[in-house]
Each structure stands twice: as structure tokens, then as C-alpha cells.
């Protein structure tokens, strides 16, 4: 330790400050709705707004559906790639990285244009228009969210599978007489528990705060509500920011706890 | 009829041959090792017996039933993997009972059998532990118990000890042998470690480049290797360039000196061949006129003290030979550069290409 | 291969379709600005708009600055953590994961509120207000982007360092007589080349398309321009979407190429 | 005065002692190994000589200069790591020349020296290769060349062979010894492999739990271990529970049978001690009245054929002893269960706690 240059401490401190200063500022500000007094009024106002409840519940429902669709899409694909087609894994890595680099706004344009008419490929109708009803627009939103969260969920599942030596465990189960359903539900899924939880919590946090998709598909989600609030009220958005931030910490705390609690660090998913 | 039989088994991957012309009959209760370097096809052959790979051609029969195309979960075969492959989400007891649970045996029978197995592997109190709480050696014992719990017809072991430390490896290999003999289970053991194969097996199949090189007892494999691959892969070997001088009379010549060979020479007189002999069958000193012992002289190149063994390298002119002696306190060892005489019995050497 | 259930193929196909259909739809639509004829007019219109040039250049400048700030912040910190403080690495992993789960909108609220007044901590002024001048607002934007891209850049650098056995290489260089500058510039940085490139390209793609931060800080960036265009013109945004998408592919192609070309797969960074 | 000297060196980490009371004088050109199990402090000691760790107390002197607090990049010491640690972004030649470049030597001198080094490690044509294009053994040779290129005062090797395969390991260790002797460089070698330490060293320091157990030549360490740790860590050992019957006359009793001991007994008459003897010093058969040989009888427990060696375990009543014999074709081996007589010279056994 002794001979290590001082500038490292400097950078470390700078990084920490950089990260926590805005948080402290926000907290300080959100408590000052009444002049010269610290109060929780901003929190009270924000949480009792019926619009808050409505949008928050809606976004939570969307998040749960997104998580289900993601798991159904990703787990069998990733498992199969690990077990039998290791050569397609680079391609999967590549594809699932792309939502990182396609801005959400481009994604939503594509979704709207493609699915607002009956989708035809070479003249044949493939999918009916989805933006006509609330229900089908929600489906479109969920699929959009699934793409947005694909990198996180896929990476979690992929790490989880990588940590458990899929092929040998599958063969060990087979030679003991197990068929495919037993292998999937008794061996693979239980060992992906923490990986799925970690992916799900990340998905949850992203969907609940997401702005672009919900705005352009005109759905009453929490992200647009928060943005709207920011244009009209001075203090409440900061209270909600901090609440959302706290929820995030709780979620990540759960990940950490479950990961530790299982005592099987090497099976943890996450990024 | 043999209990486990492989007939003309061949396996190709993408048009390259992994195993060919594999024929083997294993008796009930026999312990057979597949020994060879990596890529020799030993693991592929084992995986065909397990059903994870299908032979391109040929047949595999267990207890008279053709199993060639049976999926692995219908074969009633137990397997132990190099990487243990215990299910991390289950306790040791649940791991051991997994096969029985799949077979829908009653819960109390499973419980009883798991207890028996835990006793067999000398881990009676570890039933409620999770695999990550055990050492590598203990995990592999559990994997063995799991493979044996449902009383498979055949036990397959795929380099089960190569992930373990040297001391545990030696300990666990005699453990495996003890359990195998106690249960009398027919066993195939894959390894690249010649000492392991020699010490544990009833018979060894030496493999190289997808082919069987030799099948025999450890003693036969070590003392009477039939191919030059087997001779050099199993144990240390000295090779002297010699000329056959009298094939009938079992004599050849090295640097003008006649050497007696204990075994038949299958080469013509005048052929340039190599005389093979093991370092531990050589001794320092003259043959004292014994016509069944050969004598060579040369200068000591190095004396290497390895603990229980002292290895002396002697330059006999055109070739260097190693001599292994057991360390003894009274031993007077030659120094590097000293001229020494070396002798070895005719019986201990043989001629190879 | 033989015994593997059919449904895997089904899922695989579905995933592929799901991903590429919108793309095809967008391409098809963007070529139809003239009725019944395929033409590149939409691309022409979009690319010749002076506002496009201006915002695109601005976003590119911001991206380059963000990359520089990120590298200066992250490389020494991550190197130090690998070399001397492995016990802080879980904390770093955790902190750098957080921008994933804090919506950009909350980040920008915090930044604006904190830095639009002289920032005081316990009554002492620490930072002057940053939103008063264009220059200092740009600084705020760059720092915001740095936080947004922190997970990508940190993860790339961390993977790069993990792949190279930092401690032994450092010690090997030390015992051969090298001092810290030599170790950093001759050993560590050259071996992080692909990792830095991969992090930089991801950062680049994200910054150029980013909407929320630029909008709320009222800077003339490419993301808001694209969103604005989407509200006014029917075809051009799709042309730009595809161009941006193509740029992304090129960027990722470069990553792949450099990673391969170096012949040192094990040193590749990226996710 | 010794070339490299460690005086009363002690190292604590977080209040736990890693190394204590370490005193060693190494002569110029000597090859000394630190041998011990993992966690015994051998690597910590090496790292203190390199300067990566600072001693909590004590002094380290190289060629008369106190180096205790000198940073590693000023010590002029060469080091080879277990993980090779070649710089992946540089060619082999650039790796080897790195230390010279740091020292700002002229380019043509570096080039010449790199060429010499490549010849020394028998890789003359690999200069333009990158490390990832070489095998593990070749990489470690390059690491050795890199450590030697700038003519360090001392060469340190930290388990340099443990990442390599068994055959390469044996080959490379004699290569290291050859180069060390050719250059006459003072060398410290850390290993946990007793055969490696025995075969390569001028002297061995056996370590356990942070302390020096014994310092001596390989022959002394193996044949005259001074502590029970050394005796059991280096080589195989049979231990018989015996009672001292006549300390003066060097006699003790096992199951009522008198045994002669070759070395002084430092215990009182009647003390319960253990008689230690190496498996390779035992022989089958009677002592034929030789008063300097001891005799035991028992039932054969197992006969294990290990290739060059046959290990026979005999239950002599209350203890099982191993006997190692060289495999010979003519050898008539006893069967399990057979009664045998075993003999060993008085000189080969000693008494321990």
C-alpha cells in the first residue's frame, strides 16, 4: 500500500463525491418545500396524488409482464445455446447487446410504424395492427420493454448458465434417468434462481422509470408522469426521484442478500 | 457371453474419425481402464457406452441387450464426471437419492438406500450438507455414491480424479477400487494417468489416435508392451540403437558389443532396430560373467537424487541411458564424469522398430 | 442434436423474427416517401438539413469528451482496485451498476437542481452554478453522460483488467526495473486497447442517441433533434433511424474486427 | 560473507505471523529451494527478497548491500512467476529485452543480448512470436530468459513449473538447472513439490507454518530428517509404534520383538515412540541372522502394481507397513493374505516422537 501514488486516492474520492453530491443536494432540496423548515410535505403531496398511484400501478403491471415474456423467451434459448449450439453464443451475445446501442426513440419509431398497420412481408399480412386497442398497444409496449431489457436479462441468464456447467449437469441428470421437463424444472431453473431474480429486478427498475416508449405509445406510465410533474411542480419530482432511488437500493439489496444467502456465490447471475 | 460388449464401434465427427474398430468384451464385475493421451478417443468411447454419443457404426450390448440407440436416461448406467457435476441446489442426500426419486421409488426405501451409500463412502454425517460445503475429494465421493445408488448395470468414470490434489488422488483411487470390489460392479474407467490405470485396473485398454493399441493386465501392459506407443506411453523407457546380429539366437549388437535379448526378435539379421529397457531393471557394476546378463560401459552424465529413487544418466556412446536405483543410506554413488559399468538381465530387454 | 425438443427451434425463430421484422418494416417505409416508388429521397432530405449537421456534430463532440472523462476517471480507479484493493471491487461493481437502474430523468433533475445554484455543503460553497453559461452547461451534460455510460465503460475496463492478471504483470514489470508511468503506459494501457475501444464505441452510440439529458439541459443534441423530427415529418426520422442503426453496426463491426485482429481473444473487454 | 543473507526476518499480516525467525546465508552461485505446503510462508519469504513485501523486522542483504527497504525496481533481481506473466502486447524479443530497455541500454546491445538469451533457452527462431502463440513450457522459458537478460544478482523462481504438464515439468526443471549452472547465478526456488526440490537444489529449506524446519542438502533432508514434519512431508514414511527398550544400545521393541536402530535414540527407556522407515528400504524375506538387519512378519494386505514400482502393504500386527520393490519380470510376488517376512537394515530406521 505504502508505495502507491497519492493520485489514486484523489480519483477515488472525486468519484465518490461526484456520485453522492447530487443525491445529497436532491435530498436537501426535497425537504425544503416550506421556507426555512425541513418537512416531508413534498413526499406526502407526491404519494397522495391519485395519478401517481394509477401510473405507478400500471408501470408495475407492465414490468411484471415484461419479466415473464423475457424469461420465456430467453431461458430456453440461452439453455439450448449453452447445451448444444455453443457456436451460436457469440451471435446471441452480439444480438442481445444491440438494444444498448439503439436509442429507445428509434426503437419506438420502428415499433409504431411497423405495427400500426397490418404488417405485411412481401405482400402477405403477418400481424394485425396493434395500436388500435389499449390492450394490443399494451402488448406492443411490453414487447418494446422486452427488447429494451433484453441485454440485462440475457446477460443475467447467460452468466447464471455459465456458472453452472450446463452440459455436465444436464448429462448427470440424464444418466440418472431424468427427462427434459425434470432437467429444466428440477436442475436448471432452481440453479438460475439468483440470476433470474437479478435480471428481473433490473428489468423492473428500468421499466418503471422508462420515459420514451411510454410517451410515444401514449400509455399512462410512471416515467411520463414523473416528467410531467417535473414541468409543473418544483419539489415533488425530487421526492419521487428519491423514493424511486430508494426502491432501487432496496431491489439491489435484495439481489445482494439472496445471492449471499444462497451461499453459492459462484451461481450468482447479474452482470 | 460378456456382460458389456463393444463390437466394431466407430465414431466420426465432421468426417474426422474419433474412434475406429473398437472391440471389447468386459466380464461382469471386471474393472477396465481406457488409458491414453488426450484426444485418443477414450472419452468418446465412454460417452458412447453412456449414450451421450451415438456410434457411427457398430453395436454396444449390455447384459445381452443391444443398447446402441437407447437414450442415456433409459440405459441404467451410472456415471462419474471429472467436474463432479453434483446438483448445487440439492443437499448431498438429495443428490444421492435423485436417481431413485426419478424412478419413483418409495420415500423410505430412498432414505434407507441413501444412508447405506453415505456409509459406503465414509461420509455418514454429510447428508444435509450442500455440495459447496464439501472438499473436492468429498464431492467426488458423493458423485460416486449418486452414480451407484440406483444399482446401475455398469459404472462409468470419466477421469474422476484429475481435478484433485496428488495426495487425495492416491487415497480416493484405492477407495474407488475398494467400493468397486465390494459391490462387484462392472466398471469402465477413463484416465490419462498411467500410474492410476496400472494400480486400479483388472485390465487396461491403451488407446492412441482413436485406435486400441493393446489390451491386457497392468503387468502385461507394463512388462510386455506390444507397440512402441504403449512402451513409451506407459512408464519410462531407455532406447538403444542396435543392429540385429542373430535373430534366431536372440542377439544384437551395440557399438560392436553383443547383447542378449530375452524375447523373440521379429526382425531380420542386419536390421537397424532399437533395444528397449526400463531404467529400474538396470544395475551398476559388471555382469560377473553371467551370460544371461548384458554389460555396457560409459561415463556418468548426471546423478539426480529424487528421494526414494536416484536416477543416474550414463552416456554409453551414441546414446544416454537412465538407471533408477532405490535410495539407500549406504549407497556409494558415482560422480558425474566417472566411468561406470552397467548390467541388465537379457530377460528385461526387448527389440522394437 | 437429434434428441433436442422442437420448441427450441420455435423460440429461436420467434426471437429472430421479433428482432428483425421492425427493421425490415422501417426500411420498407423509409424508402416510400414517393407514392408507389422506392426512393432514397427521405435519406437525402434528412442528411442535407443543416440542423442535422449541427446537432450531429455537437453530439459527436460531447461523445468524445465523455469518453475522455470516463477513461481518466475509470482506468486509474479500476487499476488501483485490481492491484491493491480487491476488497473494494464488489463496492465498485455495485456503484457502477446503479446508473442502469436510475432513470435518466431522475439523474437530470438531480443535476439541474444541484448545479443550478452555487452548491453548498453544510453552508460552504463548493461548486459555482453551472447552468449559467453554455460552456458550463456542456460540462454538466458531459458529466451526466459520463454517469450514464459509467456501467459500460467500467465493465469494459474491469473485464480487460480481469483478463490480464494485473498484479503479476505489474510485479513482473517492477522487478525488471519499471516505474509507475512505464507500467501504466507500456503495459496496462496497451493491453486495455480493445477493452477501451469497446467501451468507447458503446459510449459513443449511447451519447449520440441520448434524449432526456440533452432535452432537459436544453442543448442542441442529435437525440432531441431526432425526436422533434419525428413529430413533424413522416419519413425522414426513419431514414435517420436506419442510418444511426447502420452506424451502430459499423461500430460493433469495428469492435469485433479489432478484437479478432489482435489475436488475443482473452484480452478482449466488452460485456 | 554470504552473497544473499536473510537475518531474523519476520513478516506479519494483520497480526498473524506469516514468516518468523528466518535466517539463511546463500553462497554465490548456490541453488536453494524453499519447500513446504501452501501457506507455509515460502512465497512470502521469496516476495520479501524481491521487495514486493517488506519484512516486519529483520534484514535482507544482497552482495553486502542492505536491500531491506529498497523498492523492487531498484534491486536488480530477476524473477519468474508461476503464471509466466509475459507481457501479452509485446513479442518474445521485446519481452526479453524489456529490462534492458528500461535500463536505457543501446539498441544493438539489447538485440545482441536477446539473441544470446533465445539461444540459451533453445528457442532461437521465436523472437518475433507473441506469447499467446507459444506453449506453456515455451512461455516459461521466455520468462526465464527475460528474468536473466539484464544479468540480475539473484534469480527468484516462484513455483515456475506448477502450471505445466508432468512431462514438460520434468524436462524444464533440468533445463532450469542447466542454465543456472552455466551462468553460475545465485538462485532461490520456491516449490511445494518434494521431488522437484530434491532433484534440482544444492540445498533445501523445508518450511512449515512460517518456520524453517530444516536446512540441508537433498540427501540430508531425505535421509536424515530432523523433525517429524520434514520426515513425513518429504517422501513416503512407515511409522511403527514402538517402545524404547535400550536407548544406549539403540534397541526398541515392537510387539515384543526387538529391533535394532541405526541412529542414536534421544528418548528414555520405556518411552512410547515411533520407528520411521522408508518403504524402499524394506525387503521381502528373512534377515538370515544378520544382526544389523531387523525382521518383521505379517499378512499381505494388498499388492499394488504401479509400473516401475510394486507396493506391498503388510499388516505386521497393530500397524500396516508399505514395501516398495522395483518391478522385475522374474519377481514372484506374494498374494493378498499370504504370511511374509520382511527385513530392513538397522541403519535405515530412526526413532521419532
Image (spheres, coloured by chain):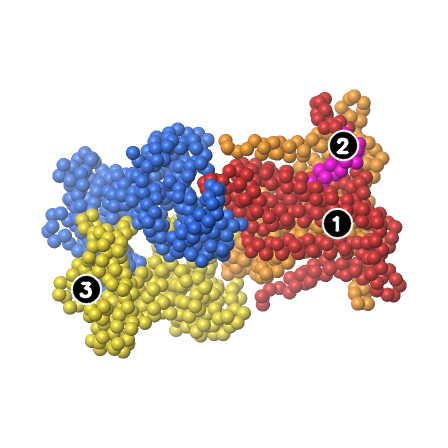
Chain colours: A red, B blue, C orange, D yellow
Q: Relative to the observer, which residue lies in front, D5 or D240?
A: D240
Label 3 residue SS: strand
Res D94 visible: no
Percent of width and height locating residue A222: 79, 47
Q: Residue at x 32, y 43 (%)?
A: B29
Give the residue number, with chain letter if any, for mark 2. A130
Q: Numbered disc 1: what chain?
A: C
Label 1 residue SS: loop
Give residue A161's quadrant in the image.
top right
D116 relative position to D228: left or right? right
D351 relative position to C93: left or right? left
Give the residue number, with chain letter if any, for mark 3. D295
D74 relative position to D33: left or right? right
Q: Is residue A143 one of those drawn in magenta?
A: yes
Label 1, label 2: how far apart the Cα atoms are:
27 Å
The magenta segment is A129-146
Label 2, label 3: how far apart the Cα atoms are:
95 Å
Relative vertical location of residue D148 with respect to residue B345 in this rendering, above or below = below
The 10 Å Cα crowd at callout 3, few under 14, some 14 to 19, many 20 or more, is many
Give the residue number, with chain letter if any, for mark 1. C103
Q: Which residue is drawn at 70% across and 59% down?
A: A15
Q: Residue at x 58, y 59 (%)?
A: C86
Q: Residue at x 15, y 54 (%)?
A: B286
Q: Relative to the observer, which residue lies in front, A80 or C194?
A: A80
Amino acid at each position: 500500500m505504502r508505495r502507491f501514488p497519492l493520485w489514486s486516492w484523489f480519483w477515488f474520492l472525486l468519484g465518490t463525491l461526484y456520485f453522492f453530491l447530487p443525491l445529497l443536494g436532491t435530498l436537501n432540496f426535497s425537504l425544503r418545500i416550506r421556507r426555512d423548515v425541513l418537512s416531508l410535505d413534498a413526499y406526502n403531496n407526491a404519494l397522495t396524488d391519485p395519478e401517481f398511484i394509477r401510473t405507478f400501478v400500471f408501470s408495475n403491471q407492465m414490468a411484471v409482464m415484461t419479466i415473464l415474456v423475457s424469461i420465456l423467451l430467453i431461458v430456453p434459448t440461452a439453455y439450448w445455446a449453452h447445451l448444444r449450439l455453443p457456436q451460436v453464443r457469440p451471435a446471441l451475445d452480439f444480438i442481445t447487446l444491440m438494444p444498448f446501442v439503439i436509442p429507445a426513440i428509434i426503437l419506438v419509431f420502428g415499433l409504431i410504424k411497423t405495427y400500426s398497420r397490418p404488417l405485411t412481408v412481401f405482400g402477405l399480412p403477418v400481424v394485425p395492427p396493434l395500436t388500435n386497442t389499449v390492450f394490443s398497444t399494451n402488448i406492443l409496449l411490453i414487447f418494446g420493454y422486452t427488447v429494451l431489457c433484453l441485454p440485462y436479462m440475457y446477460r443475467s441468464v447467460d452468466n447464471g448458465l455459465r456458472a453452472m456447467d450446463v452440459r455436465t449437469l444436464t448429462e448427470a441428470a440424464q444418466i440418472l434417468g431424468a427427462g427434459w421437463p425434470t432437467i429444466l424444472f428440477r436442475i436448471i431453473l432452481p440453479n438460475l434462481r439468483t440470476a433470474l431474480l437479478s435480471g428481473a429486478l433490473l428489468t423492473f427498475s428500468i421499466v418503471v422509470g422508462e420515459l420514451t416508449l411510454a410517451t410515444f405509445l401514449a400509455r399512462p406510465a410512471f416515467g411520463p408522469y414523473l416528467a410531467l410533474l417535473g414541468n409543473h411542480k418544483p419539489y415533488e419530482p425530487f421526492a419521487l426521484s428519491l423514493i424511486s432511488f430508494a426502491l432501487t437500493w432496496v431491489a439491489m439489496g435484495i439481489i445482494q442478500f439472496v445471492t449471499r444467502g444462497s451461499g453459492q456465490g459462484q451461481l450468482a447471475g447479474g452482470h | 457371453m460378456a456382460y458389456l460388449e463393444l463390437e466394431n464401434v466407430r465414431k466420426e465427427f465432421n468426417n474426422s474419425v474419433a474412434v475406429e474398430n473398437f472391440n471389447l468384451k468386459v466380464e461382469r464385475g471386471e474393472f477396465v481402464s481406457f488409458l491414453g493421451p488426450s484426444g485418443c478417443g477414450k472419452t468418446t468411447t465412454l460417452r458412447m457406452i453412456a449414450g451421450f454419443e451415438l456410434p457411427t457404426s457398430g453395436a454396444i450390448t449390455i447384459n445381452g441387450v443391444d443398447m446402441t440407440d437407447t437414450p442415456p436416461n433409459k440405459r441404467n448406467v451410472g456415471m462419474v464426471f471429472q467436474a463432479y457435476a453434483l446438483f448445487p441446489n440439492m443437499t448431498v442426500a438429495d443428490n444421492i437419492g435423485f436417481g431413485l426419486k426419478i424412478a419413483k421409488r418409495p420415500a423410505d426405501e430412498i432414505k434407507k438406500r441413501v444412508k447405506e451409500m453415505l456409509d459406503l463412502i465414509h461420509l455418514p454425517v454429510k447428508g444435509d450438507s450442500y455440495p459447496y460445503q464439501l472438499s473436492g475429494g468429498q464431492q467426488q465421493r458423493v458423485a460416486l455414491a449418486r452414480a451407484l445408488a440406483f444399482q446401475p448395470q455398469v459404472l462409468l468414470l470419466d477421469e474422476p480424479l484429475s481435478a484433485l490434489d496428488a495426495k487425495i488422488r492416491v487415497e480416493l483411487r484405492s477407495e474407488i477400487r475398494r467400493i468397486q470390489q465390494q459391490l462387484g460392479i462392472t466398471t469402465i474407467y477413463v484416465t490419462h494417468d498411467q500410474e492410476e490405470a496400472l494400480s486400479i485396473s483388472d485390465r487396461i485398454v491403451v488407446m492412441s489416435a482413436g485406435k486400441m493399441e493393446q489390451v491386457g493386465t497392468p503387468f502385461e501392459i507394463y512388462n510386455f508392451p506390444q507397440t512402441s506407443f504403449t512402451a513409451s506411453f506407459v512408464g519410462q523407457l531407455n532406447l538403444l540403437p542396435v543392429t540385429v546380429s542373430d535373430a534366431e539366437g536372440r542377439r544384437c549388437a551395440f557399438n560392436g558389443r553383443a547383447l542378449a535379448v530375452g524375447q523373440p526378435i521379429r526382425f531380420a539379421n542386419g536390421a537397424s532396430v532399437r533395444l528397449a529397457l526400463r531404467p529400474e531393471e538396470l544395475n551398476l557394476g559388471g555382469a560377473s560373467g553371467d551370460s544371461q546378463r548384458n554389460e555396457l560401459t560409459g561415463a556418468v552424465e548426471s546423478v539426480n537424487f529424487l528421494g526414494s529413487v536416484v536416477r543416474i544418466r550414463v552416456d554409453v556412446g551414441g546414446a544416454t541411458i537412465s538407471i533408477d536405483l532405490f535410495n539407500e543410506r549406504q549407497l556409494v554413488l558415482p560422480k558425474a564424469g566417472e566411468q561406470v559399468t552397467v548390467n541388465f538381465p537379457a530377460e528385461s530387454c526387448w527389440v522394437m522398430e
